[in-house]
Amino acid sequence: MTGEPPPTPAAAPVPAPAVRTRKAGGHLTPEVLDQARQLIALYPEPRSALIPLCHLAQGQDGWLCPDAIVEIADLVGLTPAEVRGTASFYDMLHTEPVGTYVVSVCTNIACLLRGAEELLEHAGASLGIGVGGTTTDGTITLEEAECLADCDRAPCVQVNHRYVGAQTPESFDRLVADLRAGARDGEVPRHGTLIRVRRSGGLRVGRDRIAAERAAMAEAKARRAAEAEKGDH
Amino acid sequence: MADPTASTTRVTAAGSPGATAAAGGDDGAAATDGGAASSPPEDVVTFTLDGRTVTAPKGEMLIAAAERAGTFIPRFCYHPRMASVGVCRMCLVEVSGPRGATLQPSCFVEVAEGAEVTTDSPKVKKAQDGVLEFLLVNHPLDCPVCDKGGECPLQDQTLAYGPGESRFVEEKRHFEKPIPISELVLLDRERCIQCSRCTRFAAEVAGEAQIDFAGRGELLEVATFPDHPFTSYFSGNTVQICPVGALTAAPYRFSARPWDLDQVESTCTTCAVGCRVAVQSSANRVTRLLGIDADPVNHGWLCDKGRFAYETVNGDQRLTEPLVRKDGRLVAVSWHEALAAAAAGLKAAAARAGDARRARSVGVLGGARLTNEAAYLWTRLAKGVLGTDSVDAQMADGLPGDLVAGLPRATIDEMVAADTVVVISGDLREELPVLFLRLLGAARAGKVSVIELAPQRSAITPSAAVSLRYRPGDVAAVARALVDDGAPVPDGIDPTALGRARELAGAPRVVVVLGRPTIAEHEGLVADAALTLTAALPGVRFLPALRRGNVHGAIDMGMAPGLLPGRVGLEEGRAWFAEAWGSVPSERGLDARAMLAALAGDDPGKPEALVVLGADPLSDFPDRAMAERALDAAGFLVAVASTPGPVVDRADVVLPAAAAHERAGTTTNVEGRVSRVAQKLVPPGQAWADWMIAVELAAHIGTELAPESVAAAWDEIERVAPAHRGLTHAMLDARGAEDGVVVPLGPGPARRPAPALLDPIAFPGIESVERQGAPPRAGLAEPPAPAPAPATGATPGTGAETEPEGTARPPILALPAGVDAPHVAPTDAYTHRLTVGRRLYDLGDAVSSSPSLARLVEATALRVSPHDLDDLGVGPGDRIRLRTATTSIDVEVDVDPMLPRKVVAADWNVPLGEVTAGVLVDGRHPVVEVRLESIP
């Protein structure tokens, strides 16, 4: 087809000349993105930061949503399929939406002996959901967990990865009421993030220090190699 | 059903170059040497295998060493063309160690000096039983309705090594099925045995991990990311290497049982890489194509276009009868009548042109889809009988024929073994996909450094050491700046990147992949760049990245102005071919651009008639408007074609030709490798093979071309074409020449390829079907001895007295001293230059008439750099007006941060708004200048 173009309807005025890209991005908040970049800077290979980044994104949204996966993939140089593949391996990363509070009840041997099954049954009944389910108000997701390494306080329960001590059916109901009322906000963050990730995301060690350490390591490696070479001859 | 144990003997008999190459994990560069390389003793390990003493190269995996020694170890996840992972545990063998003999995966353990390996002990047998019993816990026994049934490694190895009975009585898993993970590939999850061949292929070989495992344990499954389908051009390979029926190809699913298929080995001619394929058919229809592991070429891989474009051949849109235009309408006639009409028309055209213009009387366009034999005979018909030199197999979208014929040629193996590869070409993944795979593998392994010269990004960009983005028109200047520190650096080239590129280009082994970085840039500029590089870089070699099927064979057979068969110039070969043919054109003719321009402009020097050989200038010639005017103005138009199209619509005589898989012969790939294409089908209706059409048309014109068979045609080529000297038909037919032979032949038999093996577990489907007939490569221990050079007839001496026989064979063409590189005028600040790249799935014939591929063609947008987009005040997705000197269109824009400023990019022969980029290119100018305007 050649010649004059067909008349086109007048396009809406373009408000700003800023370039909108179709690239992945825009889902993580600037603050989280900044933490993510600092985390990536800690490693020689960007992809090494994959799991900490998943925790960061989960801290922002409560779960790893597809938009976050696409953005993480772009940040670490992997495909979204690979990021989801890795994330879906781990129980602590949620690739489906969960409630504000993920309540994990351990049913491993020590807890089992101290009434974990009964506790889990009670929890399901009182929340009106099965294991893996989320309450209709979107507050609480109930999980059955393997050993959470808090056997001395069996039956052990975690909320968003924070221990909340030994629980009985009665204390469990109080815990749920507290959570719903926001009374535990200081102790249990909404959308739990691992503290370590937050902390290393804050990057308390300066970049120059990291660079110096890396240089020292490389030097030591070269020295060892040179010595080994000398030893050979 | 194939018995994998039986393959053991085959493996022993043939030796295993493929396995050796894989053990090194490299691209098998050494394999061109052919025979067993004698490694120095310190690199050889001696160990005991089932009581025998066996040697193997250091670093080789046990499974490969055992296979080479004749002991087949069952396996699923191991694949000789990919890195080992050791996940399926099927290849467990007993290996002695400090703690006594322990079971170890032989695909993950290197051979060790003095190790004692047992592959058939009760302990090993028990392990194999156990692994297979576990694999079958959840694998459904739906073999009767599974595509893989009959050629399935799980089925075959269960029979050969399994326990025979399962202790599991529980219900097996059920999933929703099938899940389409792309338009071409379907997934049945319950059949998956989690060997990770497909996910490793996607990540490791194709470099696009669009599929990966998701979940864990028994819930592990292959998955794509939602809304990110498995769109890789190489997705079909995962179907082929899947050791069960978990991945199936949509076009093949449920269409056949493997034992009902008949097979020949052939060469794919969809593009010019020349991948070796097994063509399988049933009831005169191609059912599927499978990649054969040809060590020097494709390593078993195919692109999806090559794999699925056979649907074109099966299509019902085929020309089956000769047609002649009578009273303005095309009417079906007999072959005799059609050939007589064509002969009369061509003779009349020659008469109209007269002796003075005889060398330009008839234009012959196209020929890149012919076999070598057909290309030779059409050249002989045009140049020897009609006396015209206006023959061009390319559509001004390639490179000058005499440049291609004269370039020092590299092989693909030499490319991946080079220090530096300079890519001056369009996106190789779009144009020559399997060549891209080979280059990508070498680049990602850090074996070669890639310098990319192109106006726009390509799939190799992320793996390139340096990418020099230039404005269309600057390619020759950038090449000069690359090799000459004193040369001016064109605008927009980053000096740091250029400095790094200069360092890399100074390496001892440099190979240039030379194609067209953009179709909207005159080919003379690229030719100029090539000559600059040859002059400055001693020892540089080239892989001409021309794309179309057998375009290299057509050029080698003289289908370009100024060329004669065997890479000989018209003047140099005049005496020799005058003797062989009776006459040759008196002067150089026109190329495609000049022919179409002369016809379109009604120039007095225009061709009086046009023969179009299976080509479509309307979509292939860069300037669509000019091609259209030229075809309309052709005085007499003969179309030799397999399918209808715009050329057939305008033709005076239509001669129906056989398509791929319907004719036998040879084809030539980018390296100059001549390999056989086989006939599997009978052509539909009255369609003839192209070579027969040439011979019969010549007879109607009044000249008998001697060959009465394809073999005789090749014999004639061997006799008269200097570059093909010594490559006899017997040699091409011999066992061991399946992967083709590179011309011109080098000194001695070392240039000949070693036979490759068919591994029934690595590439299931090929071997187990073939076993019903004679296996194509069974029992081949050594390449055939070189045939003695045939004596040639007495010929007049015109030089070249150094030939051993003292004949007058003309020399193979040297590089032209210079080329006509057009002058590119500088552009003003308001003008952009257009760059046009190709897409694998386009509106061309092969894709449009293959239903599975046709729906993969994407609508495209004009790509603009972020700066230019800002200047215009529009964003991605908005529409702008694009003006050229001749036309103006409104198109959607997209942002491309990798584009240089003042360059806009479009794709060739795919929808661009309501048009294609063909309307934008003006064939009269060396570059295409456009202006962008916001739509008021």
Image (cartoon, helix red, strand yellow):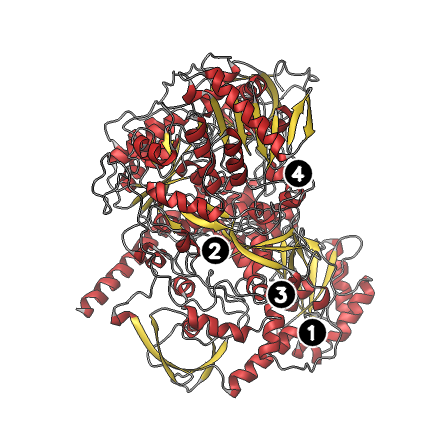
Residue annotated with mark 3: B244
Could you tell me the amino acid type at mark 3?
Answer: Val
Residues B876 and A159: in front is: B876
| Residue at the disc numbered 1 | A107
Which numbered tag is attached to residue B320?
4
* Residue type marked 2: Ser
- Looking at the rendered structure, whether the residues under marks 2 and 4 are on a common chain is answered as no
Measured Cα–Cα span from mark 3 to mark 2:
33 Å
Tell which subunit mark 1 falls on: A
Q: Which callout, 1 or 3, points to the residue nearer the camera?
A: 3
Q: Is residue B338 visible?
A: yes
Q: Are marks 3 and 4 on the same chain?
A: yes
Left or right placement of residue B624 versus residue B785 in this view? right
Q: Is residue B742 left or right of residue B252?
A: left
The chain ID associated with circle 4 is B
Numbered label attached to residue B463:
none
Q: Position of residue B224 (x, y in %)?
A: 63, 52
Instruction: Please identify, in this view, whether the residue under mark 2 or under mark 1 is nearer the observer.
Output: 2
Q: Is residue B92 above or below residue B935?
A: below
- Disc 3 to disc 4, C-alpha distance: 40 Å
Residue B912 in view (yes/no): no
- Gap between marks 1 and 4, in whole Å? 74 Å
